[in-house]
Structure formats: structure tokens, C-alpha cells
Image: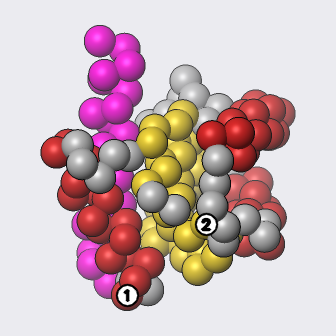
């Protein structure tokens, strides 16, 4: 099993309805394909972690790359794992607020990653930040 983190920009303005449609479709397809994960949305930027069978996740990522709603698509990190971080979520979702102190670092990093087209040369720091945010989000939901 793998965890894969990607970042992409929205190719157009996304309404609440657009985001709801993405989530509905993702959750339906992910349940069917045994994929779990978390989608973060920050001012025109998608940040997503997908977990599941490597072939299944890679096919999904190929489909997302071709989706006309995405631009500047980048796989930031991929790792093998024995345990799912988002096992309860066919697709968790959080909208980051750039004005909220807890979201500022992730928001700034996501914007910088897109602006600079950063690869994984940061030693996995970006991935670790997203995982930490995901754990914090899950603890808020289940608290």
C-alpha cells in the first residue's frame, strides 16, 4: 500500500457546488476502489493525500492529472506504508483558511510549492506537515 501526496492548482474559480461535486464523486469512487485520503482546499490550491493499492492510486492520479479542473499538477511525495492514516475516510475534506493561524503554515507552503514547482528535495518536510495537519484535523473531528 502507498500514500501519495500531490498539489495542484485549480484551472478556474471553484464554487462550493464544484467542491461538493468533486467530493461526492471522489467518495463514491474511492469506496468502490478501497482508496482513502484527505483533500485540502486553499484559495485555488488542491492538496491531497491518497492511500491504497499502488496500482489503484497511480491510475487515480493519472485520471486526476487529466482532469481539466487541475493545472500545475505535481506529485510531491510517495511512500510505502502498512497503515492508513485516513482509514475512516473515503475522502476527508478541509477548507484551509489563510487567515486562521493554524492553517497559515500549510497554506503558505502550498502556495510556495506551486509557485516554485518544488519537488521532493525537501526531505519529505512538506509531506510531514500535511500528515501532521491531517492528524490534527482528525483529532478535531473525533474530539
Determine whether, in the image, residue 24 is placed left or right of residue 126. right
Tell me, yes or no, if residue 113 can be seen here. Answer: yes
Q: Residue at x 34, y 46 (%)?
A: 97
80 vs 20: above or below: below
| Residue that carries the numbered disc 1 in the rendered image | 116
Extreme-left residue of the structure:
101
**Which residue, as the protein is rendered here, is positioned at the far bottom?**
116
Q: Label 2: how many residues lie within 10 Å, few (<14), some (14-19) or many (20+)?
A: some
> Element at badge 1?
helix
Residue at the location (57% across, 29% down)? 89
112 relative to 46, above or below:
below
Q: Identify the residue under disc 2.
A: 10
Tell me the magenta residue range.
119-143
Left or right, 107 with respect to 74, comes to left
Label 2 element class: strand
44 part of magenta stretch: no
Q: Is residue 121 left or right of residue 35?
A: left
Q: Main secondary structure of the magenta part?
A: helix
Amino acid at each position: 500500500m502507498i500514500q501519495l501526496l500531490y498539489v495542484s492548482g485549480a484551472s478556474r474559480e471553484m464554487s462550493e457546488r464544484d467542491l461538493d461535486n468533486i467530493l461526492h464523486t471522489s467518495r463514491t469512487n474511492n469506496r468502490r476502489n478501497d482508496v482513502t485520503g484527505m483533500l485540502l482546499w486553499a484559495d485555488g490550491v488542491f492538496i491531497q493525500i491518497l492511500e491504497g493499492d499502488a496500482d489503484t492510486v497511480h491510475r487515480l492520479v493519472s485520471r486526476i492529472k487529466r482532469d481539466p479542473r487541475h493545472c500545475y499538477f505535481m506529485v510531491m511525495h510517495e511512500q510505502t506504508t502498512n497503515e492508513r492514516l485516513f482509514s475512516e475516510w473515503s475522502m476527508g475534506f478541509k477548507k484551509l483558511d489563510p487567515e486562521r493561524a493554524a492553517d497559515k503554515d500549510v497554506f503558505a507552503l502550498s502556495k510556495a510549492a506551486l509557485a516554485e514547482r518544488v519537488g521532493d528535495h525537501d526531505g519529505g518536510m512538506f509531506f510531514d506537515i500535511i500528515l501532521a495537519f491531517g492528524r490534527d484535523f482528525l483529532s478535531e473531528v473525533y474530539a
